[in-house]
Amino acid sequence: MARFLTRWIIHRIQAVLLSLSIFFLAGAFAPAFAHFQMIIPSDEIVSSAKKRKIGLELVFTHPFLQIALNLQRPKAFGVWVAGKTTDLLGTLEENSSQDRVGETISSFKTQYKIKKPGDHIFFVQPQPYWEETESVFIVHYTKTVVNAFGVEEGWDRELGLKAEIIPLTRPYGLWVGNVFQGIVKLNGQTAPFATVEVEYYNKKGEVTAPSDPFITQVVKTDANGVFTYVMPRAGWWGFAALLDDGETMQHKGKAYPVESGAVLWVKTKAMQ
């Protein structure tokens, strides 16, 4: 009996050690899912004078998986409309919520009253985020466009952000299946052959990826810095061009690279 128990204990220990080995090995080769800074407005097109006020939510997250990260108060946040930029940083209110896995995370929200017709380009420059698993700082210069009262002027305006996507396709009034194109720039220069990650904002968790490569789509810019993508589903889509100009930041006395992301959010709707 004692010999039997000894063998059983040994087998159990071996099984546990094997399981742990597989777990850590899988972790070592697990994909690093894409980060996206988000600016999501409650409406991307304002056409009624009775609904001039829109809400805006700022979140730093993995959009498809709905696993969010804590967002510090941004370095800059504002809106460009009709040739004028307005600082909105002081309007942000800290928001606390739970992501899909039940973690409490900090984000920000605000409201904005549309005062004039035309395209409103909302933008944010977050504080650098230290990503321990990748040994890199992440700064995503992020934009989204809200059209007001049918005046379609300004949506292709370049704001002069360090990293920026300038849309070649009007970034609103998009049907599912429309081709979307944009130019990626870094420090005002086009970024040829840059990697652009694309993710669907899977807010309600309705879409299940059959395997990891389906979570983040990947395209590259051409020699002129232009990328192309066709969005297959209704909802919000994020484009994040990942750029490196050699900038570094210090962390615990050591210099690490800074990933400057040019991010743009657009919304598609299904034809009924």
Image (tube, rainbow, N blue to C red):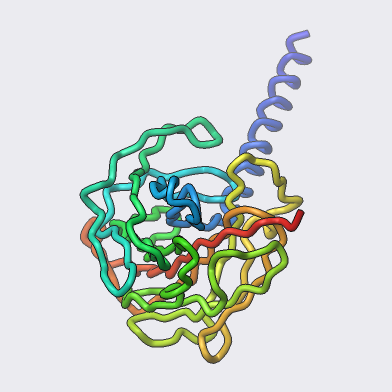
Image label count: 0
Could you tell me residue 29's position as x and y percent? 60, 55
Location of residue 6 with respect to 107 vertically, above or below: above
Is residue 211 rendered to the left or right of residue 267?
right
Residue 226, quarter of picture: bottom right
Q: Residue at x 43, y 56 (%)?
A: 37
Residue 252, quarter of picture: bottom left
Is residue 212 rendered to the left or right of residue 247?
right
Name the one closer to the observer, 9 or 118: 118
Q: Residue at x 40, y 50 (%)?
A: 52
Could you tell me residue 43's position as x and y percent? 49, 51
Could you tell me residue 23's position as x and y percent? 62, 42
Location of residue 2 with respect to 160 vertically, above or below: above
Residue 56, visible in the rendered structure: no
Could you tell me residue 253's position as x and y percent? 21, 60
Is residue 145 rendered to the left or right of residue 17?
left
Q: Residue furthest bottom?
A: 223
**Quarter of the image with the N terminus in it:** top right
Q: Residue at x 58, y 43 (%)?
A: 203
Location of residue 76 with respect to 103 vertically, above or below: below
Name the one closer to the observer, 148 or 230: 148
Q: Residue furthest top?
A: 1
